[in-house]
Image (spheres, rainbow, N blue to C red):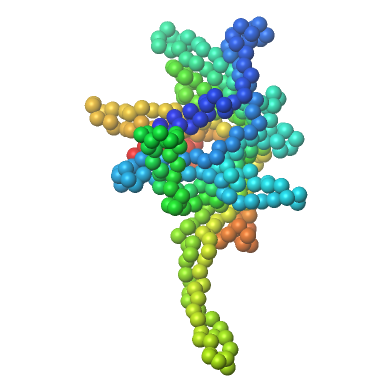
């Protein structure tokens, strides 16, 4: 899949004019109040709702345009009512709902109560070379992210020649399979620094912060659609009254499932080993094609390097097999998990490297 096209799509959504209610100060106003030139932006929103999110793979698995498919995130359509009959399922009709994490009386919110605060400065850099850059220091409140059903579908088609055509492409509802029944993410406050241009910090995005309260993933459901409608056996039903006139003959019926099987996990919590918070230290870089002579030796990709922040504790609560109503098989705890990566064979560095690219 064309990863950078997708990244551009996400960026364009994030920057759309009606997405934010911004409170900004220009350079002169900021300088007058703080003694420092720059631009300060407070993103004062309380919630973002996305109806559906599609990530289209325009050539499918075998490279054929007619096999184009898409990952789709959409509402799960489940109506959940409280005691007063009010709808309580935030992702009934929306694939993604992002709001602030109001847990513990606002302990995970910024002092400004904004969803995010940005401080933007331009700098000529050091060394006298081509070293200018833009620095964006970001503080982000704790987030409460709810994601609806995630599945795969056949991509729809746009018709630019039609007078009624819209920007929407969508998918084919009759060719859709759910993969995840949904999940929720709860985060604490985070700090990140973004540098565009020379990036003397060594990466476009540097995440170096402590997430207060750690990270929690809730209500994670993994679906197996291959088991939906599975026939286990064919049985003979009660033939009825053998003395009836005429005699009611026996009939057969299938013992079969009606819904997809599900692995459901109530909660996954991640913190530093033997602590309550989660330390993050990550560098995020975007690389173009790398050449050996005139041939591409390494394709363009996104690279995320997680630096050593110590071992982590994981607690997985409420594991249900079959469906979320089935009895839990219990909890699972992982203490002091440490990952490593090798830049040189048989040399191990604490951390992890993740790369994302197209085929």
* Residue shown at 49% from the left, 52% from the top: 178
In front of the other: 209 or 137 = 137
Horizontally, is 337 left or right of 81 in the view?
Answer: left
- Residue 191 lies, in percent from the top left, at 59, 27
* Residue shown at 61% from the left, 28% from the top: 140
Question: Can see residue 239?
Answer: yes
Count of labels in the image: 0
* Residue shown at 48% from the left, 48% from the top: 151
In front of the other: 192 or 80 = 80
- Residue 308 lies, in percent from the top left, at 52, 34
- Residue 95 lies, in percent from the top left, at 55, 42
Question: Can see residue 143?
Answer: no
- Residue 40 lies, in percent from the top left, at 61, 16
Split into 4 quadrants, where in the image is the C terminus?
top left
In front of the other: 42 or 341 = 42
* Residue shown at 41% from the left, 43% from the top: 156
Depicted 20 relative to depicted 237: above or below: above
Q: Residue 226 is drawn in which quadrant?
A: bottom left
Horizontally, is 238 left or right of 300 in the view?
Answer: right
Horizontally, is 357 left or right of 53 in the view?
Answer: left
């Amino acid at each position: 899949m064309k990863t950078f096209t997708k990244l551009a799509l996400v960026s364009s959504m994030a920057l759309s004019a009606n997405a934010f209610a911004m409170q900004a100060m220009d350079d002169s106003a900021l300088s007058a109040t703080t003694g420092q030139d720059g631009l300060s932006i407070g993103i004062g929103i309380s919630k973002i709702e996305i109806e559906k999110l599609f990530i289209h793979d325009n050539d499918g698995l075998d490279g054929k345009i007619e096999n184009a498919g898409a990952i789709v995130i959409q509402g799960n359509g489940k109506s959940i009512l409280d005691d007063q009959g009010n709808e309580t399922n935030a992702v009934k009709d929306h694939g993604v709902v992002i709001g602030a994490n109001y847990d513990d009386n606002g302990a995970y919110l910024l002092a400004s109560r904004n969803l995010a605060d940005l401080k933007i400065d331009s700098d000529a850099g050091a060394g006298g070379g081509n070293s200018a850059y833009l620095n964006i220091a970001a503080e982000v409140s704790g987030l409460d992210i709810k994601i609806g059903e995630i599945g795969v579908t056949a991509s729809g088609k746009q018709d630019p020649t039609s007078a009624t055509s819209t920007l929407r492409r969508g998918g084919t509802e009759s060719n859709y399979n759910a993969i995840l029944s949904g999940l929720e993410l709860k985060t604490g406050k985070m700090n990140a620094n973004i540098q565009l241009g020379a990036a003397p910090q060594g990466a476009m995005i540097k995440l170096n912060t402590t997430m207060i309260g750690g990270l929690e993933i809730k209500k994670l459901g993994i679906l197996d659609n291959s088991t939906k409608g599975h026939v286990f056996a064919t049985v003979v039903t009660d033939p009825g009254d053998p003395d009836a006139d005429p005699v009611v003959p026996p009939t057969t019926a299938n013992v079969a499932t009606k819904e997809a099987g599900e692995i459901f996990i109530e909660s996954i919590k991640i913190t530093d080993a033997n602590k309550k918070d989660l330390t993050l230290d990550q560098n995020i870089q975007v690389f173009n094609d790398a050449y050996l002579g005139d041939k591409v030796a390494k394709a363009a990709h996104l690279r995320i390097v997680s630096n050593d922040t110590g071992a982590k504790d994981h607690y997985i609560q409420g594991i249900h097999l079959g469906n979320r109503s089935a009895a839990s098989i219990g909890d699972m705890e992982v203490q002091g998990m440490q990952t490593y990566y090798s830049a040189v064979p048989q040399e191990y560095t604490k951390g992890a490297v993740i790369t994302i690219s197209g085929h």
